[in-house]
Structure formats: C-alpha cells, structure tokens
Amino acid sequence: MKAALVGADGTLLHEARRATGRRRGPEAVVETILDFAQELRALGQERFGEPAAAAGVAVPGIVDAENGIAVYAANLGWRDVPLRELLSHRLDGIPVALGHDVRTGGLAEGRIGAGHGADRFLFVPLGTGIAGAIGIGDRIEAGAHGYAGEIGHIVVRPGGTDCGCGQRGCLERYASASAVSHAWADASGDPEADAADCAKAVESGDPVAVRVWQEAVDALADGLVTALTLLDPRTLIIGGGLAEAGETLFTPLRAAVEARVTFQKLPVIVPAALGDTAGCLGAGLLAWDLLAAQRPTDPEVSA
C-alpha cells in the first residue's frame, strides 16, 4: 500500500508505504487501510497543524465510485466493501472519494504528469496486466458501467493464449510485464528470468531476447493502434514496470505504431512521469475535487 498527504495543487507533502498483508484475508486488508489512513491524518495534524480535510482511496478491481463501494478485487479477495463509508467513519466524518487505481493514476498523470496540457490522452500502464485510463480535459472517463479503458482485453491474437477474462489472445497475455517475463523465462531456459532481464539482454544484442521483445512490442502496437483509432488521443502515456526499460521499449514501440497507422493521427508517445506515486497523487486529487464539488457557490444576486 502507498499513501500520501497531498496539497491542493498536487504537491506531495508526505509519502508512506506499508505491506498489504493480503494473506491475512480481506477483512484484515480493509482494517489495515483504515488504520493507515487514520495514522496519516494524525501525522497531518502533527506536522502541518491541521488534519486532512478529505481523503481519497484508489483500489484495484471493479469499483462503484458513485456509491463508494469496492465491488470486487480478485487479488484482494473482497466483494462489495463499503470503503467510503468505513473510511469516513474512521476519519471522523470527513468526505471520502473512492476511485479505480489505474484511473486515479491516469488522473494524476494527466493533470500534473506526462499528460499535463493535453486535452485528450490515454494512459496505459504495463504491469502484471494492462489497463488504461482515458483522459478528457481534466477528468478520466469511467464509462457507463465503470469499465472504460480495459485495453488489456482487446484481442490482438485471435484464437491465441487463454486469458483469465474468458477470451483468447488478449493484449495483456502478450505485452504486459508478466507476459514478457514468462516468454523470456521460457526462451532463456531460466525460470527466474523476468522482463527486466529480457530488456538487458536486448540491450546487449541477444537475438533471442530481441525476438521475444519485438513480439511483445508488435502486440502492444496492434492494441494501441486499435485504441487510438477509437479514441484519437493527443498524447499516449506508457507507464508501469515495462516502461522502465526506457528507449529499449519506446524506440521500437514508436516505430511499430507509426508503421501501423494509416489515416489516424499519430499521438505523441511518452513515458509516464510520476512512477508509482501516481496512484497516491491521483487519490489526493480526487479528494480535493470532492471538496471543491461540496463547496457552496455564491448566491445569485437579483436586481
């Protein structure tokens, strides 16, 4: 878990980390979140002379942001957790905003990170899986049911590898950091090898690594071109563990995307700027947005 105290302008005032402890069960994870938030609020009081005015929390899985419910998270084992209500109660009734982890990360990248100034952007983190956040102005589009941006489940290799979503050939089965790790472990014969090792082997000119890497880049480019055809973003922000390879990823990826576009406008393809603090900063921005929305407007004056 990562937590932060965030200023109104997105300034990171304090950051802390703590083990999720998911092996202790979903109830224990929720309790850890509540304790962590309470301690952070007390630290704000101690260090800045006042407690946090609102809280934001970003969680994985399916999120009902409107009702403040963490609906489902396979890796945490929870269902229908009323997280907003629980947090507000623990934090003496302050307003609490709940968001999806990738979308909150995208919110931060759009407002104060790599997408700053772009009126339309797509944020795609390449980690264990692949997700996406669709930026429109200063907000993130969640979709009618909260599922917008699931680019990792675009089918790029029909009839290909089985995916946990029930389809076959999904993008994240070929171009996520975990997919590259598995492919390189198989190709290199080293079960401990991962995507970072593959990137290093590419940089050293290993032809097998170059093949594995290029296959992932090609799959990623296929998925991204589908996304930009639908969304027409001005900026395409790539983050997550795979993006840490830097130009080892971005040079061939830009070339692969450019080779695939026809009538589409080519977006600027840039690395994410905020790293793994994006989710914390985005959650803080959600909290500030909530306060702004609740602030009373000036009454109309009639002549």
Image (cartoon, grey):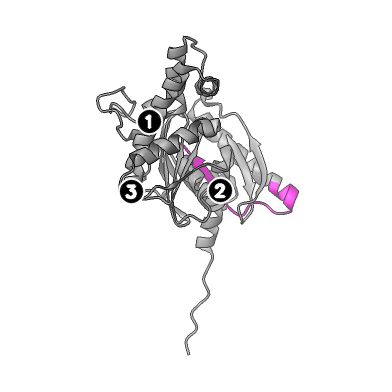
Which type of secondary structure does the marked residue at label 3 adopt? loop
Q: CA distance from mark 3 to mark 2?
A: 25 Å
Residue position for label 1: 218
Q: Which residue type does callout 3 highlight? A: Gln
Circle 3 sits on which residue? 264
Secondary structure of the residue carrying tag 1 is helix
Q: Amino acid at mark 2?
A: Gly
Vertical position of residue 209 compared to residue 110: above or below: above
Q: Is residue 86 left or right of residue 7?
A: left
SS category of the residue bearing label 2: loop
x and y percentages locating residue 34 in the rendered image: 57, 39
Q: Who comes first in sequence, dot 2 or dot 1?
A: 2
Question: Measuring 69% from the left and 48% from the top, which residue is drawn there?
Answer: 44
Q: Is residue 79 visible?
A: no
Instruction: Read off the residue under disc 2.
Output: 113
Q: Is residue 261 left or right of residue 268?
A: left
Give the residue at the far bottom of this rendering. Answer: 303
The residue segment tinted magenta is 44-60
Distance from disc 2 to disc 1, alpha carbons, whole Å, reads 26 Å
Whether tag 1 and tag 3 are in contact, CB under 8 A, the answer is no
Q: Taking 164 as reference, is 125 left or right?
A: right
Residue 221 showing in the rendered view: yes
Task: Identify residue type, mark 1.
Answer: Asp
**Foreground disc of the pair 3, 2:** 3
Q: Is residue 228 magenta?
A: no
Residue at 61% x, 40% y is 3
